[in-house]
Image (tube, rainbow, N blue to C red):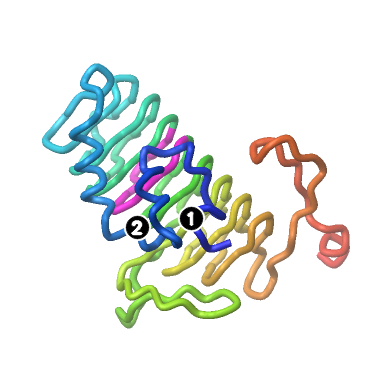
């Protein structure tokens, strides 16, 4: 579940071709800046304006006057960048996204319909289709001892990266004031309870309730990823 294909539906990003060349999504982080520069030079000028050098914004996007747009970045159709948002650069933001009040982005790929709407920091990370971060939720992208980040699930993967935030799969839901520690992986349709401090891997279709308390969801019906009706397993509800 750690691979690009397991975490993301590549139909919902301009980075599809680029990401498809990698096994693991964190391998794509070093090239995000060059990717944006390459994509930006080929964008349809009838759809995108170059608002500032290396800052491409779709004509339907709504940008607050107080927002800072640092290049290189691409902001997709119908996306809203709100008051005092701080895009530091190397940010590929998809369609129908929300980048909210005082949210900071750096070296990221946001798939279509991602919402980071209130006081979020997202750095050196990739957020999949319809991922949502609650108010105050952040990705921590550097370890306190500055050593290279490892991915810790059933085994350990050395990434060789000193800066690596989180990979949040499609439909990931991150509760308010949560911290995703360096190298955290949230599987598709994973949910993190508010005020959590998460490290390691949260499997797809699971709920992170606390350290050593990751419980599976039970599917009521499946039409597609956007029509999942999911609840805790009865035994977990019964035991609180």
Which residue is under mark 1?
4
* SS class, disc 1: helix
* SS class, disc 2: helix
Q: Is residue 209 left or right of residue 73?
A: right
Residue 223 found in image quarter: top right
What is the x, y in percent for residue 14? 37, 38
Q: Is 62 above or below relative to 22?
A: above
- Counting labels gives 2
Residue 46 found in image quarter: top left
Q: Residues within 10 Å of mark 1 (few under 14, many from 20)?
A: many
Residue plotted at (41% across, 43% down): 16
The magenta segment: 97-112
Q: Residues within 10 Å of mark 2 (few under 14, many from 20)?
A: many
Residue plotted at (67% across, 64% down): 209
What is the x, y in percent for residue 212? 67, 75
Task: Work out whether mark 1 precedes mark 2 in sequence or the reverse, and give the earlier one.
Answer: 1
What is the x, y in percent for residue 231? 78, 50
Q: Which residue is nearer to you in this view: 101 or 75?
A: 75
Residue plotted at (42% across, 53% down): 126
Q: CA distance from mark 1 to mark 2?
A: 10 Å
Labels 1 and 2 touching (C-beta < 8 A): yes
Magenta segment main secondary structure: strand
Which residue is under mark 2?
28
What is the x, y in percent for residue 7? 54, 53
Q: Is residue 135 left or right of residue 164?
A: right
Quadrant for the N terminus in the image: bottom right
**Identity of the residue furthest to the front in this view:** 21
Q: Is residue 113 left or right of residue 213?
A: left
């Amino acid at each position: 579940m750690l691979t690009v294909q397991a975490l993301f539906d590549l139909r919902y990003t301009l980075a599809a071709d680029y990401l498809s060349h990698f096994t693991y999504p964190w391998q794509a982080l070093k090239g995000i800046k060059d990717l944006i520069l390459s994509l930006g030079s080929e964008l349809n000028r009838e759809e995108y304006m170059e608002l500032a050098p290396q800052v491409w914004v779709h004509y339907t996007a709504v940008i607050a006057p107080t927002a800072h747009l640092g290049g290189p970045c691409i902001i997709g159709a119908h996306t809203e960048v709100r008051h005092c948002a701080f895009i530091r650069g190397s940010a590929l933001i998809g369609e129908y996204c929300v980048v909210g009040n005082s949210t900071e982005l750096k070296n990221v790929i946001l798939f279509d319909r991602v919402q980071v709407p209130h006081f979020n920091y997202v750095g050196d990370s990739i957020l999949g289709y319809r991922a949502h971060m609650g108010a105050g939720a952040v990705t921590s992208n550097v370890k306190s001892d500055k050593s290279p980040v490892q991915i810790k699930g059933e085994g350990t993967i050395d990434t060789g990266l000193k800066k690596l935030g989180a990979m949040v799969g499609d439909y990931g839901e991150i509760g308010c004031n949560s911290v995703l520690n360096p190298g955290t992986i949230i599987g598709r349709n994973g949910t993190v309870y508010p005020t959590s401090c998460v490290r390691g891997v949260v499997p797809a279709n699971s709920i992170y309730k606390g350290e050593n308390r990751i419980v599976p969801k039970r599917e009521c019906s499946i039409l597609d990823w956007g029509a999942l009706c999911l609840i805790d397993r009865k035994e977990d509800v019964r035991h609180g």
